[in-house]
Each structure stands twice: as C-alpha cells, then as structure tokens.
Image: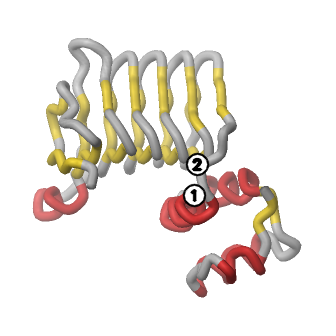
Amino acid sequence: MQITKELLTEKRACSGGMSWFNAHFPEGGEYQAVLDALAKENNHGYASWLIQNMGKADTVLEVEGDLAVEFGIFFAGSIKVTGSISAKMILAGCGIKAGSGIKAGWGIKAGCGIKAGDGIEAGSGIEAGSGIEAGDDWGIYAGLRVRVSQKAMRALVIAKDLPKNLLLGIFKALE
C-alpha cells in the first residue's frame, strides 16, 4: 500500500504527523517503508496511529534465529521469530510469536496475540488484541522501567483474558 499526503489528509493525520511525513516522504512512501522509518526514530505514537488508520497487513515477518535491533520494530502484519525478539518498542498489526523470549525497553503492542516460548518483558505496558502467553514456568513483566507514581497508567497489561504468568504489571481487560 502506498501512503500519500492525500491519504493522510483524508484520514485526518495530525499536523505533527503530516510534517514528519512530508519531511521524510515528500513523494509518498510504501506502508512498511514508512513504518521502518518511524521505527528507526522510535516514534511509536505515529506508527500506532498509522497501523490503526491504515489497517493490518496479511504479511508475516519471519526470522530464523534472533531478532535484535537498537530501535523499534514496527510491522503492519505478524512477527514470527524462532529465537528471541529484542527492541526498544515492538509493535505489530497482528500477532507476535517468539520461540524464546520477547523483550522491549519500552512497550509491546500487537493487534492480535503475543506468545513467547520463554518470558515477556517490557519497560512499560504490554497490549494484545487477544491473549498474552509466556512459556510454561516463565513470567510476564510489564512496567520494569516505570516510576512507581505512574505504574497504574503505564505498567498496564491489556488483553482479552488475564495472562496466567503475569508477575509484574496491572491487568486491564480488553474493551
């Protein structure tokens, strides 16, 4: 899908988002290329808005082994990794699945479910459109880097059902 100024105007993008897009993609850009540029800047706010307004993709990012980056991972489809995933922020339009652990310096958000063979750790919140599941005898930790005074607002674990291995974070049922 091609993202254009006209499409963003039609979807009522904010002025900050439009300015960012015009500076980085003056001629427009392919959906995933725009998400990749946002990821390199750890701009999860605009990326979340883009996925929410442009929709999920039926594509799958498949990686044999580990997927570790210094910045965010933003993908409009599903992310499937045989090893572990590590990034500042992980955002997927659909599901996230890792053979071993999932770790984000900030947060983790998936339009569908999140599943890891080992533990799941996030500096702030974890949100899934359906369930969140860590491997047997592994924990789910949200809010590892959140001030105590902001725990109720930023260490949220949002999912359809309470994850069985939630060890840190405040559960909120998906509305």
Label 1 Cα crowd, 10 Å radius (few <14 / some 14-19 / many 20+):
many
Could you tell me which secondary element the residue under label 1 belongs to? helix
Task: Tell which circle, 1 or 2, labels the residue nearer the N-terminal end.
Answer: 1
Judging by the rendered image, the residue that carries numbered circle 2 is 74
Q: Are marks 1 and 2 in contact (CB under 8 Å)?
A: yes
Q: Is residue 139 left or right of residue 82?
A: left
Where, by quadrant of the figure, is residue 144 drawn? top left
Front-lying residue, 38 or 70: 38
Q: Is residue 48 left or right of residue 34?
A: left
**Picture coordinates of residue 31, whole percent (x, y):** 73, 56
Q: Amino acid at mark 1?
A: Ile
Judging by the rendered image, the residue that carries numbered circle 1 is 51
- Judge whether 53 appears above or below 105 on screen: below
**Picture coordinates of residue 108, whole percent (x, y):** 40, 45
Name the residue rendered at 51%, 60% in the picture: 48
**Picture coordinates of residue 162, whole percent (x, y):** 18, 36
Label 2 Cα crowd, 10 Å radius (few <14 / some 14-19 / many 20+):
many
